Image (cartoon, coloured by chain):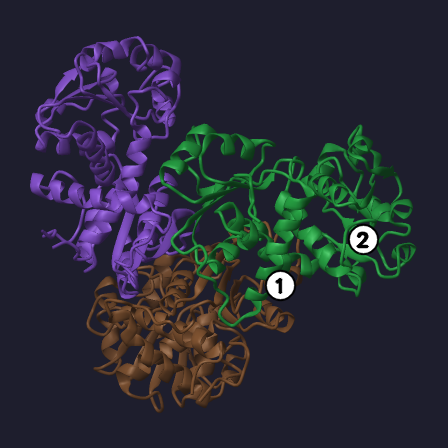
Chain colours: A brown, B green, C purple
Amino acid sequence: MKLSRKDILGIKELGADEINLILDTAETFIEVSTREIKKLPTLRGRTIINLFLEASTRTRTSFEIAGKRLSADTINISSSTSSMVKGETLIDTARNLEAMNPDVIVIRHRSAGAPHLLARMVKQPVINAGDGAHEHPTQALLDMMTIRSKKGKMEGLKVAIVGDIAYSRVARSNIYGLRKMGAHVVIAGPATMLPRDIERMGVAVYCRLEEAIKGADIIMMLRIQTERQQQNIFPSLREYANYFCLNGENIKLAKEDVLVMHPGPINRGVEISPDVADGPYSVILDQVTNGVAVRMALLYLVTGGGQ
Amino acid sequence: MKLSRKDILGIKELGADEINLILDTAETFIEVSTREIKKLPTLRGRTIINLFLEASTRTRTSFEIAGKRLSADTINISSSTSSMVKGETLIDTARNLEAMNPDVIVIRHRSAGAPHLLARMVKQPVINAGDGAHEHPTQALLDMMTIRSKKGKMEGLKVAIVGDIAYSRVARSNIYGLRKMGAHVVIAGPATMLPRDIERMGVAVYCRLEEAIKGADIIMMLRIQTERQQQNIFPSLREYANYFCLNGENIKLAKEDVLVMHPGPINRGVEISPDVADGPYSVILDQVTNGVAVRMALLYLVTGGGQ
Amino acid sequence: MKLSRKDILGIKELGADEINLILDTAETFIEVSTREIKKLPTLRGRTIINLFLEASTRTRTSFEIAGKRLSADTINISSSTSSMVKGETLIDTARNLEAMNPDVIVIRHRSAGAPHLLARMVKQPVINAGDGAHEHPTQALLDMMTIRSKKGKMEGLKVAIVGDIAYSRVARSNIYGLRKMGAHVVIAGPATMLPRDIERMGVAVYCRLEEAIKGADIIMMLRIQTERQQQNIFPSLREYANYFCLNGENIKLAKEDVLVMHPGPINRGVEISPDVADGPYSVILDQVTNGVAVRMALLYLVTGGGQ
């Protein structure tokens, strides 16, 4: 099977069959990264532009490694050095990049919808590496891959997503994806961090961590953006942690074989206590490993790969 | 034919035969960037250092892609991360880079003449990627390539260059090059933006856009450095645009098959109205595409390529 | 012979046989950088992460070139772009990098001991590219390589190290290494720049440059960190230079075939007068060339290379 779309902009528009195609493909790439020679000739002579207009190391590094392990040439453009973008609309940036004939453009942007605008402007495939508070599809795909590989399925699982839901593109992409794959999604967070009408996305909403994680198969803790504190979204990290930190005590409310996930970087002791982050339930590092494989799969599929 | 000089520092010192050699070579590389596998083994095992001590994304990206499509290893050094350069003279930087045995050094520097100093210090070929308000030879070469490929020649064409001439290394390099190739060059801009004695470069000078573009085959609009406004070089962007913005009206003064060029990034509505920038006369994106080919040609030629 | 340790964290823990192995291996790589095709397939498909959390161009460039000449994929992470590191402990950064399956992690960090912490956390080899005022083992190795190749030996040579000893990781690593290899090491610097109990490292200590360099085979001048002036470590650069600048006069106190070294970047006229820096005794650029070879050797050896 091949991907029938040009771009990967969000999970919202993907079908369950497409998600399965991506995860199946990613699984075939997992093994490559464990070899001594971690390289396939698949994308030799292709040019991948990593256009990161919002600071990122983790995701950019993951994409860069993914591209190189497929033998592609990778070009990094970051906001700090990007005079290209100053005094120039995203449209002009897009057209300029297009004129250099890249094969894929990966974009992270602080504004929701920027990748979609880019995708409409250029003929090349565009992959959204996170846009504002909107979507972060590659994160959700690596999360779903981690769940599927550990649990053998997603259908019927109870997944609790906890934290700053309103601001989280990770939460949004995961809710779309997990619901499509048949999971039961519940969310929890301080009232100021819950978007209105979130129930419409088909999730159950709780104000207390304990209620959300009760009987959960998966607990996904979101990162607190500490800069949001100044906006009076939450009183203090300590106060937040009192109510919403996953720890060795409250985790007992979840299933015995619960998986604990976090998109990173972790604020230890705020979202997750260190013993849980490093404990037996944690699959946080599997997420990182799967991230490289998912991004290899996407680069492969958007450039026409697949049978 | 091979290039008989070590460095590409400016258009001023190039002969018409050398310019033709570079453009002919660049044309053979255009096709590579349209292939699925955009890669030639030409510079495999060569090391190219992109030493960008003045912010740039566009030119650096173009050089990096050019190098990678020739299979070279490319090393980026930018001013933001460059402790090498702090407290060290350019001479010491040059000698240090030389000692690491690169094959080509590409340099952008805020000071006019810096590439020439570097070239005298090191045995490796040096390519000037823009030095202060002095020269930007690769930009002029891609501009000439664009004109030649669209018009079939440069000789006898009327080329109008409009804007901040005094401050523009793009203008200076193009005036040298186009004059050598037999074009008739006219310039226009506010009086504060015209260098004294510019007539000595063999160009006709006008104070009004309309006079300059009348009957022009090519209109080359220069980027306004908005930071120059604080120096009282021009009153306001709006005032500037009133007199010097190329738009759907005044462009009718030019030839019917006029080409509109801009080195980018464009300040839309200041130098060019959006309808003209995106309109049928615009070859702005051809310039970008040709930029990769011209840089591939230069990297190839300075490392000894050619028959 | 193969390296029997996982990491290269400091010279302190290396044996003379290990130092000789590294230098012997580096010598075999010197020739590669002088070829037209400067590339060996040795580390094809391996991923090297250059994690530079303290500004550096020189050392990062040297490591990047070394990796590429061995055909490895190199990934640069710098502190300026590193959101990964913000709000995240080094432990979490380490675990995340490990989960992406690199083959080597090269780290520079402002805190002494950071590379050791990283090395304990990850299964991959770690190379210390400079940690605080602690060690800079690759610099000492390239210095020893330069001495050995010029003098044919290290044993019995008098090596004078002059400058800000207390703050210098270069001095510390060289003292460990040169002493192990049988050299006689003397140091000199202003009293405020000499660490207490430095004699315990087996070196003779002088307060005057002239005493230290008398009869020296090697003079190693250290870089003055000009930002240290504000801490009242030294009165002024001029005052410092009056007493501790190596120049055409005082150098006559050394042996006739003395070698002058400096880790760079040089403050000309402060640590070394220009005529001496560029004069016949100077091997400063040999140090840079040897740096690439030493780093190729280390990357090769820590990934299991050697017979």
User: What kind of residue is marked 2?
Assistant: Ile
Q: Where is residue A22 in the image (x, y as percent from the top left)?
A: 41, 82
Q: Residue B218 carries which label?
A: 2
Q: Residue at (92%, 54%) from the top-left corner? A: B253
Name the image quarter holding residue A69: bottom left
Chain letter for mark 2: B
Cα distance, mark 1 to mark 2?
Answer: 21 Å
Q: Residue at (48%, 65%) from the top-left corner? A: A48
User: What kind of residue is marked 1?
Assistant: Ala
Please report contact status of discs 1 and 2: CB closer than 8 Å, yes or no.
Answer: no
Q: In which quarter of the image is the C terminus of chain C?
A: bottom left
Secondary element under disc 2, as helix, strand or loop, is strand
When the figure is inspected, residue C35 is found, relative to residue A201, above or below; the finding is above
Q: Where is residue A110 in the image (x, y as percent from the top left)?
A: 54, 61
| Nearer to the camera, B248 or C37 | C37
Q: Mark 1 points at which residue?
A: A99
Q: Where is residue B284 in the image (x, y as percent from the top left)?
A: 71, 58
Q: Can residue C46 be seen in this view?
A: yes
